[in-house]
């Protein structure tokens, strides 16, 4: 089968979205809407992908790499959009799909391309059967089963009562031989209420010229769903999210409560990982096997190794390796790295720091711009004071270090292996390996202070 060119129609203005963001760039489970259709085209083995944009070129520079852009100079319908891309078609088979129908999958497009190739016809339309076909163009078949025409139903005059009883509808995904399609579209008129060139009009032109157009029926009604406003976007998002959940579940992931769980499309999860309720996994988050995530946890562009536990925490742009434990109520910021079996406990914040294997930051601490060795224990309220008001500085803490509670390291400072600090210390100088660093005023007790204060 010759690899097709896929043309994605994306020139609609999207005014019903009521948004400054172009409709095709609205987010859908972690990808812009247009990227879903582009990905489906790639999965279907497209030789080339052409996106048809409006004259304002809202998508220029924002499309995935390797995708070509064509511009429809005026809003003259779906047929006009395809003609705008005619110069970028190479003469082989062409698939046409709407950019605002993001639930069409690679399997959908691949199946259509195969049916078109096997049928050896001029065109093939994707169709489906609906219990209630209201609002959709009806498929009128000939006695031999081929498609005679598509009857639109936009106005009361478009279809007869008999035609309206037909339940087979046009999905809006097409395969054509390029030369035959372009020639037919140039002969399609704009004699309709909108004064537009309808792509389905090419079917009747081709049939009149003696060519055959076939129908490829699919059972998945979701491919019909387009997005014209935010209500429809939410409906499509719910279906896309369910597909994502089911893909992970069938691969061995437990999602305890899918209704309260958000997992974006590029997230990767290993077998036997459990995602607890009210957890949100976004961006390019990647978790290994046997992790336990949540409840009430957010992971954004985060990498987890195997058997990592993360309850009630917020992680972004960070990494936790095999066996690490995080939370509850931890905040790991970009470039934080927890190595094997390290711990970031309750109310701990870590950013741009390397925490060594089996090192523990148990609770109530801030570690920023630091390098910490293996098997170190940082006591409660350990702080790295990394910012002097103008510049950030790093703190280096060696292996097997034990800091007592309420220790502050004023960077830049280095702590040697096996060192200790005294409780309540503010460390401004390096501590040699094996030494105890204490930096605090001697205690002074003022007798009778409370009585004097009462008299004042």
Image: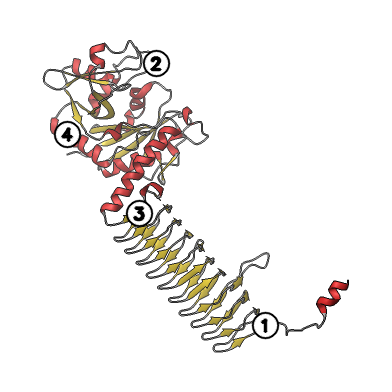
Disc nearest the viewer among 4 and 3: 3
**Label drawn at residue 439:** 1
Q: Secondary structure at mark 3?
A: loop
Q: Position of residue 438 (x, y in %)?
A: 64, 85
Q: Is residue 114 above or below residue 165?
A: below
Instruction: Give the alpha-carbon distance from disc 1 to disc 3, as whole Å.
Output: 50 Å
- Mark 1 Cα shell of 10 Å, populated few (<14), some (14-19), many (≥20): some
Disc nearest the viewer among 4 and 1: 1
Q: Position of residue 22 (x, y in %)?
A: 47, 35
Q: Secondary structure at mark 1?
A: loop
The quadrant in which residue 69 appears is: top left
Direction right: furthest residue = 456
Q: In the rendered image, which residue does mark 3 sit on?
A: 256
- Left or right placement of residue 354 versus residue 174 in this view: right
Colouring mode (rainbow / by chain / secondary structure / one colour): secondary structure
Instruction: Give the alpha-carbon distance from disc 2 to disc 3, as whole Å.
Output: 49 Å
Q: Is residue 343 above or below residue 58?
A: below
Please identify the quadrant where the N terminus is shown. Answer: top left
């Amino acid at each position: 089968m010759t690899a097709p060119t896929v043309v994605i129609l994306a020139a609609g203005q999207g005014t019903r979205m009521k948004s400054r963001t172009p409709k095709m760039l609205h987010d859908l489970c972690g990808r812009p809407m247009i990227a879903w259709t582009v990905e489906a085209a790639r999965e279907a083995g497209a030789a080339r992908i052409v996106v048809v944009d409006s004259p304002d070129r809202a998508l220029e520079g924002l499309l995935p790499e390797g995708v070509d852009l064509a511009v429809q100079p005026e809003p003259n319908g779906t047929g006009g959009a395809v003609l705008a891309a005619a110069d970028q078609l190479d003469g082989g088979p062409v698939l046409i799909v709407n950019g605002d129908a993001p639930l069409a999958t690679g399997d959908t497009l691949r199946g259509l391309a195969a049916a078109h190739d096997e049928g050896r016809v001029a065109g093939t339309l994707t169709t489906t059967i609906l219990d209630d076909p209201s609002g959709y163009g009806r498929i009128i078949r000939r006695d031999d089963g081929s498609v005679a025409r598509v009857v639109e139903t936009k106005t009361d005059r478009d279809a007869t009562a008999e035609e309206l009883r037909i339940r087979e509808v046009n999905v809006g995904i097409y395969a054509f031989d390029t030369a035959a399609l372009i020639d037919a579209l140039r002969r399609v008129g704009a004699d309709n209420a909108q004064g537009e060139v309808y792509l389905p009009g090419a079917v009747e032109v081709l049939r009149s010229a003696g060519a055959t157009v076939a129908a490829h029926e699919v059972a998945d009604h979701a491919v019909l769903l387009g997005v014209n406003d935010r209500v429809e976007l939410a409906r499509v998002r719910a279906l896309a999210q369910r597909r994502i959940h089911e893909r992970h579940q069938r691969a061995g992931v437990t999602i305890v409560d899918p209704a309260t769980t958000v997992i974006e499309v590029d997230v990767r999860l290993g077998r036997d990982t459990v995602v607890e309720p009210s957890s949100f996994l976004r961006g390019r988050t990647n978790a290994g096997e046997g992790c336990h995530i949540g409840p009430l946890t957010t992971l954004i562009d985060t990498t987890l190794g195997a058997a990592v536990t993360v309850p009630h925490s917020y992680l972004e742009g960070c990494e936790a390796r095999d066996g690490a434990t995080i939370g509850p109520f931890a905040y790991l910021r970009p470039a934080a790295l927890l190595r094997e079996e390290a711990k970031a406990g309750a109310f701990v914040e870590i950013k741009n720091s390397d925490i060594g294997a089996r090192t523990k930051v148990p609770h109530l601490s801030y570690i920023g711009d630091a390098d910490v060795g293996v098997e170190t224990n940082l006591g409660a309220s350990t702080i790295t004071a990394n910012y002097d008001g103008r510049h950030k500085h790093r703190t280096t803490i060696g292996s097997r270090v034990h800091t007592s509670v309420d220790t502050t390291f004023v960077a830049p400072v280095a702590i040697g292996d096996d060192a200790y600090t005294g409780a309540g210390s503010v460390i401004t100088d390096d501590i040699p390996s094996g030494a105890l660093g204490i930096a605090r005023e001697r205690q002074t007790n003022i007798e009778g202070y409370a009585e004097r204060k009462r008299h004042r």
